[in-house]
Image (tube, helix red, strand yellow):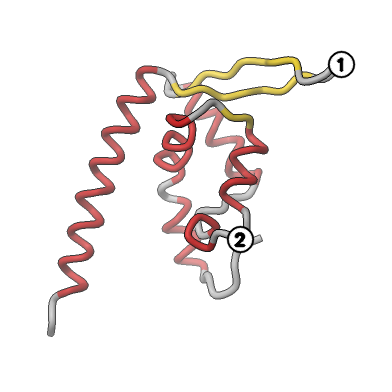
């Protein structure tokens, strides 16, 4: 499932940012779980594929976000007899996404400075 060359610590680092990633995707458009999984796990985009998480990680994360009021879900009809659970970001989730995005930006800048230091 994960791209070649990703070690355990790379996967752990990527998974640690799951809330930011999921909220960021849902801030753009409502999606169902499989759609989110497909976007993150498409091997064609190595930049996104590093964020791939298994369904055993994704769905519990979506449920935790819903329990915290950051996303909500709704059942929609996708066929005569089929329903699909779609996730939408809430106002509270949008605010949390902006906060997490700011934290990530500051962290990335700090890491860049540290990595640029010549020893």
Residue 70, above or below 12: above
Q: Residue at x 35, y 25 (%)?
A: 94
Circle 1 crowding by C-alpha within 10 Å: few under 14, some 14–19, many from 20: few
Label 2's element? loop
For residue 94, side relative to residue 85 (left or right): left
Q: Earlier in the sequence, mark 2 or mark 1?
A: 2
Label 1's element? loop
Q: Residue at x 63, y 30 (%)?
A: 32
- Report the disc number at residue 81: 1
Tag 2 residue: 44
Measuring from the top left, give residue 69's x and y in whole percent. Answer: 43, 19
For residue 6, side relative to residue 112 (left or right): right
Give the quadrant of residue 82: top right
**What separation in Å lies between label 2 and label 1 (alpha carbons)?**
33 Å
Quadrant location, the C terminus? bottom left
Measuring from the top left, give residue 117's x and y in whole percent. Answer: 13, 76
């Amino acid at each position: 499932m994960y791209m070649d060359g990703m070690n355990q610590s790379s996967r752990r680092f990527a998974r640690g940012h799951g809330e930011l990633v999921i909220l960021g995707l849902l801030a753009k458009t409502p999606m169902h779980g499989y759609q989110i999984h497909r976007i993150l796990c498409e091997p064609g985009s190595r930049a996104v594929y590093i964020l791939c998480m298994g369904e055993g990680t994704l769905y519990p994360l979506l449920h935790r976000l819903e329990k915290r009021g950051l996303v909500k879900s709704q059942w929609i009809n996708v066929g005569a007899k089929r329903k699909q659970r779609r996730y939408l970001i809430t106002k509270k989730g949008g605010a949390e996404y902006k906060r997490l995005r700011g934290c990530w930006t500051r962290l990335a800048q700090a890491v860049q400075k540290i990595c640029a230091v010549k020893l």
